[in-house]
């Protein structure tokens, strides 16, 4: 009975081993067949040859590859801007005009900031959102003088029953204007006006979205019927006391947008003699900018031409008004600029192309360099010197 049991057990063990061997042979055959699809040939380490030339080429290759990969990352992070055009239907909206202009030789109380548009709407002597700062000859801000309680400063040659006290520069100017006297030279030496000789106008103003102009002109502005007139002393012009030299630090129509350049920024006009009238004719292109995050900003791009002429007084009449006139016209179409980001597949495909191309070129360089060194030094390619 015992030998049978051993044979039975032995027989069972032999049958199980045969089944395991059969399964293993099938797996091995499958892996052997998989080798036939291998297109990357393998070389044993014993057959590899290394040289200083190959090492140098490898180091240069790694540095070039790192630089190109960084450039591709920068390109991937940047967004492309897609442009399209359509008819603008938003003419019922308001147009913000922001400016920063310095008048180097005119005080703030000598000029007026006004707007006029083709709809007939006018804004006179704009203040509030349009700030003004008096400047001295060095360009520093001169604080406005605040009169003390009960103080009464003289009106000098402008004194009259109506103007007995002139505690501010504007009151002194009004007193001189009431008597038809020139006040330009008095303003520089009077206690009320201090050392102010120039004016900086900074701020923004909302206008109708139609053709119009914003001007900084000499004198006090008033509406006479439907016409806008400026009141000032003509003798100031005949005596060459008015100088409209100016610096346009910045001017924009709408919200600031990265990459949108304002051509008038940094414009400097210097008048050496005479009273000039400056015209800046601006063509506005409404622009709607949408960034990569979907934030939409409305602004206006523009181009401009400028004209300047000396205002002459002949027979008591003038052929213009000294000042700065920003005349704008709006095109009836809308330019849409939309940022588009690159997909993630861009960086993967470009990286693969970089790696493959760089290493292919590097292998050719290494091969030619090794052959050249071998011919020069009489050694076989791939052998260290």
Image (spheres, rainbow, N blue to C red):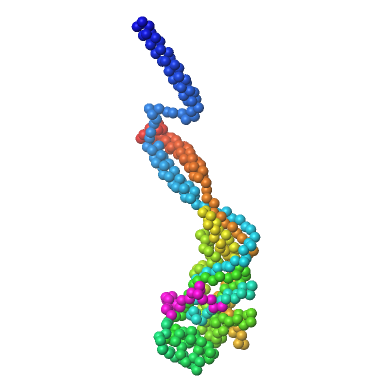
Tell me which corner region of the image, top left, top right, bottom left or bottom right, holds residue 84: bottom right
Is residue 37 shown above or below 72? above
| Quadrant of the image occupied by residue 7 | top left
Residue located at (46% from left, 24% from top)? 31
Q: Nearer the viewer, residue 11 or 282?
A: 11
**Range of magenta residues:** 124-144
Regarding residue 361, the answer to whether it shows in the image is: no
Q: Position of residue 101 (x, y in %)?
A: 50, 72
The location of residue 229, given as percent across then percent down, is: 60, 81
Compared to residue 298, the image places residue 66 above or below, namely: above
Determine whether 155 is above or below 95 in the image. Answer: below
Q: Position of residue 257 (x, y in %)?
A: 52, 61
Give yes or no for residue 65 being in the magenta stretch: no
Query: Residue 40, how many percent across, how many down?
Result: 47, 30
Q: Is residue 135 magenta?
A: yes
Q: Extreme bottom residue here?
A: 161
Query: Image quadrant for the N terminus?
Result: top left
Where's the C terminus, which quadrant?
top left
Q: Horizontal placement of 327 versus 13: left or right?
A: right
57 sits to left or right of 127: left
Work out whether residue 94 or residue 353 is closer to the camera in this orientation and state it.
Answer: 94
Task: Point out the residue furthest to the left here.
Answer: 2
- Residue drawn at 46 percent across, 28 percent down: 41
Identified at 48% across, 39% down, the residue is 356
Front residue (pair 235, 369): 235
Q: Main secondary structure of the magenta part?
A: loop
């Amino acid at each position: 009975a015992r030998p049978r049991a051993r044979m039975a057990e032995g027989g069972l063990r032999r049958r199980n081993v045969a089944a395991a061997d059969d399964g293993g042979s099938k797996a091995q055959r499958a892996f052997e067949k998989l080798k036939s699809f291998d297109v990357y040939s393998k070389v044993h380490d014993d057959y590899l040859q290394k040289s200083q030339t190959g090492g140098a080429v490898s180091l240069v290759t790694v540095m070039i590859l790192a630089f190109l990969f960084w450039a591709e990352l920068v390109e991937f992070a940047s967004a492309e801007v897609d442009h399209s055009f359509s008819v603008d239907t938003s003419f019922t909206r308001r147009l913000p005009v922001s400016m920063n202009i310095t008048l180097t030789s005119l005080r703030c109380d000598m000029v007026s900031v006004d707007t006029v548009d083709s709809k007939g709407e006018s804004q006179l002597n704009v203040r509030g959102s349009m700030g003004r700062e008096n400047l001295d000859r060095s360009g520093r801000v001169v604080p406005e003088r605040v009169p003390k309680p009960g103080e009464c400063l003289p009106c000098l040659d402008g004194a009259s029953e109506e103007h007995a006290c002139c505690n501010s520069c504007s009151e002194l100017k009004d007193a001189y204007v009431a008597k038809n006297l020139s006040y330009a030279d008095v303003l520089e030496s009077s206690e009320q006006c201090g050392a102010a000789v120039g004016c900086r106008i900074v701020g923004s103003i909302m206008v109708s979205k139609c053709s119009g102009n914003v001007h900084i002109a000499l004198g006090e502005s008033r509406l006479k019927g439907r016409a806008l007139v400026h009141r000032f002393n003509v003798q100031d012009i005949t005596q060459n006391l008015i100088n409209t030299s100016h610096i346009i630090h910045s001017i924009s129509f709408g919200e600031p947008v990265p990459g949108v350049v304002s051509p008038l920024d940094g414009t400097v006009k210097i008048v050496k003699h005479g009273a000039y009238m400056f015209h800046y004719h601006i063509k506005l292109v409404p622009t709607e900018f949408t960034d990569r995050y979907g934030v939409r900003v409305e602004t206006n791009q523009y181009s401009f031409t400028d004209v300047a002429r000396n205002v002459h007084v002949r027979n008591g009449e003038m052929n213009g008004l000294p000042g700065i006139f920003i005349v704008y016209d709006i095109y009836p179409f809308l330019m849409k600029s939309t940022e588009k980001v690159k997909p993630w597949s861009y960086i993967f495909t470009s990286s693969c192309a970089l790696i493959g191309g760089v290493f292919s070129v590097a292998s050719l360089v290494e091969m030619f360099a090794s052959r050249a060194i071998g011919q020069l030094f009489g050694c076989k390619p791939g052998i260290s010197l």
